[in-house]
Image: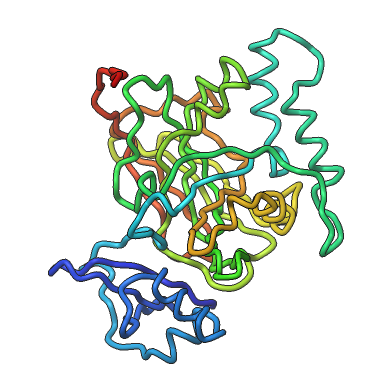
Amino acid sequence: MGQSLLQFRAPDGRRGVAVLEDGRARSVAGVDSVLELARRALAAGDGLAETASRLGLGDTVDLDAVRLLPPIDHADPAHLLLSGTGLTHLGSAEGRDKMHRAAAADPAPTDSMRMFRMGVEGGKPAPGETGVQPEWFYKGDGAAIVGTGEPLLSPAFALDGGEEPEIAGIYLIDPDGDPVRLGFALANEFSDHVTERGNYLWLAHSKLRPAALGPELWLGALPADVRGSSRIRRDGAVLWEKPFLSGEANMSHTIENLERHHFKYAPFRRPGDVHVHFFGTATLSFSDGVTAQPGDVFEIEAAPFTLPLRNPLAVAPARELTVKVL
């Protein structure tokens, strides 16, 4: 089995970092965040696992006795960017195409289907080359990250709050302005699919929502074939469940191609910034006609991650918006 990193908060309020290997979590001495560990690794020219080992692994962490935090955060949330790509997985266009075709009442291929076909034809270039660019969207900053067990808050004005089970890449921009991939996390890239269905140009609006990250930062390469499950529980019973597939064997783009097209923009290479980039999905309960309700629990699990991601759906209180003028 491979290694993962965890961030946790102990009952006394102290933060800590742990290495999870073979089902056992051990605390890392001298650091209280994965970001601090990554900065030390960069300074030493080592990997995260090597740096954790050099600092020293201590006592076993009882994961049932601590609060598991998202695997990455930043003391200044404005320096952590959430973004993503869509139509990147084989089969991912089907639900989107049906959604937009119905809205347009037009038998011609939708822009979503054309974008998907572009990825199938040119999303996997030879190593070191750049392929076709994917769909891209912005989700928010570090304040929008939700950890496992925490509610996903849908805005009061939203028309829908639906899950999107995905893998996210976690990156730190080094002092030279180069992106450094720290690892991968299980994710729920939460969206408003009813708003998007109204007009595909509203996709940007539908994505401005919180997103949940599983507690593990998987170190090393992502397996080519990632298989798991996505489900919704209502009142404790499974309301909906479907297999969740990711990894490049199930994608129309390589991860390298998605990374190239994100980080080609200079503002995304500011030294010290952290990026969480969602790679897309082909599995949506919305495509099966399911409407999640407040109190429903989204569950996502997939190897190589050993810990699941669970989040209840909630609705944020309405707030009257007033634009003030000075």
Residue at 63% of width from left, 43% of height from top? Answer: 85
- Which of 180/318 is in front? 180
Q: Is residue 41 in view?
A: yes
Q: Is residue 130 left or right of residue 170?
A: right
Specify the quadrant that holds the C terminus: top left
Q: Identify whether 66 is placed above or below 101.
A: below
Is residue 311 placed above or below 67 in the rendered structure? above
Query: Who's the residue at 30% across and 62% down the image?
Result: 68
Q: If the image is split into quadrants, where does the N terminus sit?
A: bottom right
Vertical arrangement, residue 14 with respect to residue 211, above or below: below
Tell me residue 200's x, y (percent): 63, 21
Q: How is the image coloured?
A: rainbow
Q: Residue furthest front?
A: 326
Residue at the extreme top of the image, as rendered: 105
Q: How many marks?
A: 0
Query: Who is closer to the viewer here, 259 or 173?
Result: 173
> Which quadrant of the structure image shows residue 119?
top right
In terms of depth relative to the viewer, which is nearer, 138 or 99? 138
Point out residue 32 in the picture as x, y percentages from the top left corner: 30, 73
User: Which quadrant holds residue 247?
Assistant: bottom right
Residue found at x 51% / y 20%? 195
